[in-house]
Image (cartoon, helix red, strand yellow):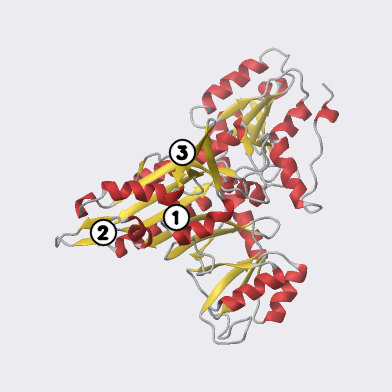
Amino acid sequence: MDDKNFVKDLTKMDDNFTDWYTDVILKSELVDYAPVKGFMVIRPYGYALWENIQKVLDQKFKETGHKNAYFPLLIPESLLNKEKEHVAGFAPEVAWVTHGGDNELQERLCIRPTSETIICTMYAKWIKSHRDLPLLINQWANVVRWEKTTRPFLRTSEFLWQEGHTLHSTPEEGLEETLRMHKVYADFCEQYLAMPVIKGVKSAKERFAGADSTYTIEALMHDGKALQSGTSHYLGTHFSKAFDIKFQNKAGKEEYAYQTSWGMSTRVIGGIIMTHGDDRGLKLPPNIAPIQIVIVPIAQHKAGVLEKVAQLKIILSKKYSVEVDDREEYSTGYKFNHWELRGVPVRIEIGPKDIENNNCIIFRRDTLEKQTISLDNLEEHIEKLLVDIQDNMYKMAKENTEKHTFEARSLEEYLDIFKTKQGFVKMMWCGNEDCEDKIKELTASTIRCIPFDEEQLDTKCAICGKPSKHMVYTARQY
């Protein structure tokens, strides 16, 4: 096969970030387009990435006392209508099932856009006493939201996610759970995805439909747009009252349960791509990469090369995910391109001369640097190298976020920033939705969150000049 014709160049990130993203996800074989517009096929490499995300998060959920369950895909319209504010938030995106075979259904069935209503219906049956609380349940599932504009991973009509739904006997316990899971998400993004996040609470306008408060983590992508990467909602008794979820408290009195919900989806895969990728393709953090090390034999037809490669794989596979690329039909250059495009953190090259000298060449994807390493020190070096790559990727992403975070103290300054730059803009806000609407109208930006670590940039709202209530992060978003 002609390598030059098979391996196509990627669009340069800075020329057209959207086209670059599409090139990367298709050519790295993470995903492909499905026959139905807005739906995606997650290919094995992409699904392996999602499995690693699942594995880590699932362990963290279980460590915090949660158990997995599964609830139906279809929800009767009557259940959805029990919570009108919630329905209004999702109504434009709901997909409906109207027929079973050739027979028209007596009641339309909604394909879940989220599962609060069906889960609340079941919780109302299960919860009777304070002894039944807290109820800590998570489900791994798919949901459907009929989006008008779609892009794989970032916004698709069907996506995979987890959604936690918990019940508590006091509002303090409910809020504690909401914040606990918000921290789980933030730590996961920073420690495993090497993706720095801004932690805070959504404005009333931006919060989840039916929530008393929504806590979010917001990450800045390479192109300066924000990605909402995970949310945790304190629902109070909003849904409990709508679905009659009551329990008898310790005093023998009946009261409504306090509820939370929280979720993270395949959208974070898009976040990994856009936070770390470059003009060569993906760069995957070692802590989450499906393949952490690829070994490429050089002159593999020569005696002893493949045998040595097999030995190295056995040794390294005890701790790491290792792939050997011994395909005879492809050149060495093609193989390098193939694995760099897929973002594998470490490549080991070894040929006859290396074996003779008892060493190998190590290539690290994050910095594109090569180093000759003694085989005697290989295991120790790889262990330190993967930690260093993970830390360096976080550091580079953090520096990018800081470089593209600006401050505005007036509407004029705010507008000037968005004329020439993309990124987070910090400003003081009066708390009025009119100012929130104004920045969206003028710049297509929104308030991403009120951060936990608010700064006092000024005493006046940057938009209207009235006394400020909060410092906020704003940005254009995915």
How many angstroms separate mark 3 from mark 1 (CA)?
35 Å
Side of 455 relative to 132 (left or right): right
Residues packed near mark 2 inside 10 Å, few (<14), some (14 to 19) or many (20 plus) = many
How many angstroms separate mark 1 from mark 2 (CA)?
26 Å
Q: Secondary structure at mark 1?
A: loop
Instruction: Note whether residue 305 is visible.
Output: yes
Q: Residue 327 location in percent, x, y?
A: 71, 20
In this rendering, the answer to whether 373 lies above or below 175 is above
Q: Which residue carries the number 2 mark?
A: 169
Amino acid bearing label 3: Lys
For discs 2 and 3, the disc positioned in front in the rendered view: 2
Q: Which residue carries the number 1 mark?
A: 81
Q: Secondary structure at mark 3?
A: helix
Q: Residue 306 location in percent, x, y?
A: 65, 17
Label 1 near label 3: C-beta < 8 Å? no
Task: Mark 3 or mark 1: name the one nearer the start of the chain.
Answer: 3
Task: Mark 2 or mark 3: name the one nearer the start of the chain.
Answer: 3
How many angstroms separate mark 2 from mark 3 (CA)?
30 Å
Q: Quarter of the image containing the N terminus?
A: top right
Amino acid bearing label 2: Ser
